[in-house]
Amino acid sequence: MAGLRLPEPRPDWALFLDVDGCLVDIAPTPDAVVVEPGLPALLDRLAARFGGALALVSGRPLAELEQLFHPARPAAAGQHGLEWRGRAPLPQPEGFAALEAPLAAFAATHPGVLLERKSHGFALHYRAAPAAGAGALALARRLAATTRPEMRVMPGKMVVELRMAGADKGTAIRAFMAAAPFRGRVPVFAGDDVTDEDGFAMVNAMGGHSIRVGPQAPPASAARWTVPDAPGFRRWLAGLAVMGEGVGEGRGRAGEAVGGPGT
């Protein structure tokens, strides 16, 4: 496939960034992630470089995003596009509250499993108990069928998410692209997991660039470019922040860790 680097940076890009596995390295638990010193300032520089067209698109709640990257406060969509700054919370589906007890019981009886509670969903993290993955997925599927409307089950990297339907990272990106300062720009989305595939498909359909962060993308992934790891991706972002001020040198360093589309 073409090229051994990520796409040539352009000033008319709109950047959409996943958080865990991209901006921060995956940690054993969600609250154990480490934000590198200087990363919030880098986000501010990137936003300025691209005319404000930068947004975080994450499965984390907005409150966590703001805490992680303070004092930077870029545009953001939390909980896979279900939560937006300045918008009233969406109503929970019928039967939502009843999901917590069986999920908590599963975590309590499977040492190493962590239940993460969100305003519009739940996540069972089993990184410390890999053998519990199949059971977590089966339970989530059973519970999803008990709500109205039915909730969506999303397996990820050592996690099973149970969240409200009706929004995903693709629809979040589409909504951003319909408004200033994103409108009329070329969307670029980076993610690392199956929950990012909706975003990859959306930016591809819009003529943009989809970037998977992590080892070689699986054949089923819609991502057209890959970066082997999060540190390499952050180095590439640092190069973008100085675009026009020696970005070629910075991108070259990151280029040592990136692959061409579909690799």
Image (cartoon, grey):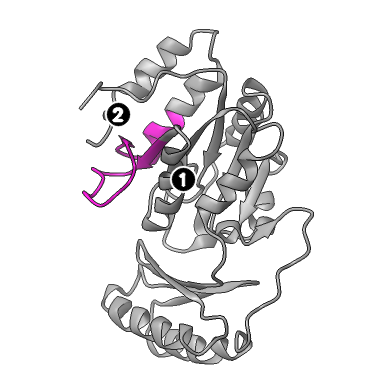
Amino acid at the residue labelled 1: Met
Res. 117 in view: no
Between circles 2 and 1, the one closer to the viewer is 1
| Segment tinted magenta in the rendering | 210-235
Q: Which residue is mark 2?
A: 257
Determine whether, in the image, residue 10 is placed left or right of residue 182: left
Image: 218 above or below 151: above
Res. 50 in view: yes
- As helix, strand or loop, the secondary structure at mark 1 comes to helix
Amino acid at the residue labelled 2: Ala
Q: Please report the residue visible at 57 percent of the width from the left and 73 percent of the height from the top.
A: 121
Residue farthest to the top, as pictured? 245
Q: Please report the residue visible at 41 percent of the width from the left and 46 percent of the height from the top.
A: 201
The Cα–Cα distance between marks 2 and 1, rounded to whole angstroms, is 25 Å
Image: 101 above or below 3: below
**In this figure, what is the number of numbered marks?**
2
- Res 25 label: none
Name the image quarter holding the C terminus: top left
Does 231 appear in magenta?
yes
Determine which quarter of the picture holds residue 166: bottom right
Q: Which residue is mark 1?
A: 202
